[in-house]
Image (tube, grey):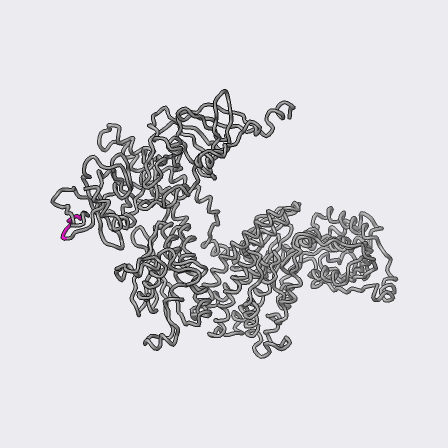
Amino acid sequence: MMDDFDDFQAVFFQECEELLGDLQDHLESIADGDFDAETLNAAFRAVHSIKGGAGAFGFDHLVNFAHIFETVMDKLRSDELDANPTVTKVLLRSNDVIADLVADAQNGAPPRDNVERVRLELEALINPAAADAAPVADAGQAAASTPAPAAPETQASQTAPEVLAEPEEEAEPTRDVTIRIAPGPEFIHSGHDMVKLIRAFKSMGDVRVETEGELPPLSDHDAVTTQLVWTLTLNTAETISEIEEFYDFYAHTADFTITDSSVAEEAVSAEAEPAAPVQEETVAEQAQDVQEQAQEPLEASSATVVELNVSSEGQVALDEVKAAVAQADAAEKAEKAAAPKATEAPKKAAASNKAAKTLRVELNRVDRLVNMVGEIVITQAVLNQKISEVDLPPNNQVAQAIEQLSHQTRELQESVMAIRAQPVKSVFSRMPRVVRDLADQLGKEVTLELAGEHTEVDTTVIEELAEPLTHMLRNSMDHGLEMPDAREAAGKPRCGTVWLTAEHRGERVTITLEDDGAGINRDRVLAKAIEKGIVPEEAQLTPEEIDMLIFAPGFSTAAAVSNVSGRGVGMDVVKKKVQALGGRVSLQNNPGKGAKFVITLPLTLAVLDGMTIGIGDERFVLPLGSVVEALKISDDVMETLPSGSHILRYRDNYIPLLSVRDLLGLDPALERESLAVVVETETDGKISLLVDELIGQRQVVLKSLEANFKRIEGISGATILGDGRVALILDVPALHALGTGHNVSALRKAS
Amino acid sequence: MSEEVKTENFDSKQYVTFVVGERLYGVEITAVREIKQWSPTTALPNQPVYTRGVLNLRGTIVPVHDLRARFGGMLTDATENHVIVIASIADQAVGILVDAVSDILNVSPDDTRSVPPSAREMDLEAISGLVARDDQMIALLDLTRLFPVNTFMAA
Amino acid sequence: MKTVLAVDDTATIRGMLRHCLSKAGHTVIEAEDGAQALEQLRAHRPDIVITDLNMPVMDGLEFIERARQEECGRTLPMLLLTTETADHLKQRAREVRATGWMNKPFNPGKLLKLVDQLT
């Protein structure tokens, strides 16, 4: 049972995550003034749903806060409150607080300090005049639609965690409580049933039932609207309030009065005297009989009234009851015939709802599917290879069918990958919050501009992106953006801007984080790097090399970093994380004007269009997107620099020529590689790689080496080729980095 | 349930034993996933000498280590007669290249001797115990320490 | 035992209801809003309905009002399970002839008792 319960909690938190995302979107639209009634409704519902779920699990702090938040949203949607900047600011803060509360509920952490503050801000919105006076319900509409500010406390007492266990009842002394019920005409048509009601009261103690009132002649009797007054004498230990809570259900359809004998014993006994007591058991059973025979149980329950008073007349009376019931039924049918179209509208509403249906699927199911499709792609490749080895006439039907299968496999794979694709929005949407918190903390004014939130990336990439992105954002706000006064002095607007953008570029996604702050202070960075022993004192570094020092391990340490960017991690962690995703970070520093970080990531970690190349006996895969062309190596195109490193004459330019063999420490070549593959590095222009042969283009399924290996420089992963062998996937920019670091020694060895 | 089984197997463990050169080694049978014939591996750059590379085990990429080379010997001149023992180390599949698989042994803790403290560090850290059988010594391997997952590779 | 129609736009609440009711042997059918609930009502003829109040498309009150016009909903016990407490909403609930009003968070024991009592 506990496990199930935990499952629900998991579902709840998952749902909360979505709701919080929606809520944030809606609130931001509201803050931007770009909203309509439905936006307000949707925001209200999101808070409301969080509250509902939280209540089910006894997350009292969350319920309390959500309650007052919801009250404010309710006022907004009923136009009692205007969405002015003061209000929306509180709403956005409330959004942050409720997100915190959800997280705290999940982690079992106590509520944070700011909860109470923001709660008071919300209360002030509800009751601006008397924010800290005792709450008084005003006579206007507001009082009717919104609970007074004191309500959360009441709510709290209701939400005591009694979720699954019934409190044990003690054997308290019992006394008689008299409940007088006069069912109104709506009683049956609100789904009630006297027999069931009596049975229900019986669960609280012994019940005696008496009836009073005049019965019309049976022929005039209307089973549905019969007025008869019932007096139940309940011998119970339950308190009045418990009984009240119990009969509150029925109170609106019947005239209820309740008298507690322990309070007013005299009155009760005096009143109860005249009518003859009837045992409840008998009533219920007899009523049941009538119901069964009448075959229309709900109608018949009222007929029990009849039966009680005429029971001595036996079967004859029953028949008359049946007749009365049948009559009532006929009347109903006539009524219904008059309104045959009543069901049309809801159908339409249901149809419109279906359009936006989504299916929630566990990620591991999708992963199984992805893996299976991956295997199919490999099998497909094997099949292709085997077919090509068989001597078949050109354009034969087998080859055509295989070709078609290839297309279909590919389409299947794309469809499956599309399931995993998610807009980066889910990460981006967490950032405004980071900015708000930090701006408060740092005393800076910052606007965050988001763009390209709908760019889709594989869900794994998305999950892993939040941390580095948050860190970079913190870094920009802490170290990049200046204090408002300093900005003003520098002729900039007091409020700094950070742009966070995502866009597709070929097979990769680019995420840019740019700010209009002071940029990176190269003198300071260099001094610090020397102080930390990252670079030797006499080092001669280009400005770009100095900039990149901020990514060096050990550059920022806990002591050197404020608690904002802090947590004791530096930008090196960002770089590592991005690299682990098969991505890269680059940096453009414009001192005084700002800095721009660019992360490029693969769209997916699962498939890649590759060019298979051969070096010796080994096969490697180059991402097809990076391959520009392949050239035959001859002395005409290859040149050697004085340092010994090789360059390739390509078009009108010279580009680096690197030996993959040497960079990766493979067995030395027996003879010089015959080909140079020109590849694009994205950040550093074109380079060329020496290989023995080009084998062909194919789509490969990426297999992680991470599980078994630390990151291997120059290799981004592995795949399985058509013949079942493993081929390593080359990481072009990493090879280039290796090359610029090692090309002197590596190529000297080669030449 | 029966008395016999109880006394026989109480606390004893089964080991897969295999041969490298003249020596016998044992690995707990629960750690062994399967045994397969040698097939050429794909070399990985910048790895320890004893890492032969990786192979494809039904879609999973598994590193293969040469046990002979791990204990300081030459790289095995692997042929089709050589065997790769696929073992689980910290839930990761790892292949160990050996000459041949020998037997499955029941070893009770009473039969196990510890490595004398005078032994070289390499032996001490990788061998969890010694067992004498038919005049031969079997070295029981501690795979987690012999091939620590994720730490033996150059960064 | 009984067939219960649980209507709530929050999956968590539906899950809780399903869990607690099916454990007690009831069959639970679900709907995410009032419109779906009406369809479920016609298709499955439940013994009792437990519905949320605030829902997209069609809220719980409108649903009950419409359901009462259906032959299968005329005398059906229909409970509102909501976090709302406002009197005017309760009054509305009476007008549309809801059988009862229960506030979230719900106590599973009480809920089961109610289901037993009303069906």
Residue A592's spot in the image, x, y percent?
31, 70
Query: Quick check: is A84 in the magenta stretch?
Result: no
Between residue C46 and residue A341, name the one nearer to us. C46
Q: Which residues are magenta?
A: A646-652
Residue A67's spot in the image, x, y percent?
58, 65
Majority SS type along the magenta span: strand
Query: Quick check: is A651 in the magenta stretch?
Result: yes
Between residue A656 and residue A680, name the one nearer to us. A656
Residue at the outermost top position: B134
Residue at the outermost bottom position: A129
Give the side of residue A561 with respect to residue C17, left or right: left
Give the side of residue A52 with respect to residue A391, left or right: right
Give the side of residue A71 with respect to residue A586, left or right: right
Residue at the outermost front position: B118
Between residue A397 and residue A370, name the one nearer to us. A370
Between residue A191 and residue A289, name the one nearer to us. A191
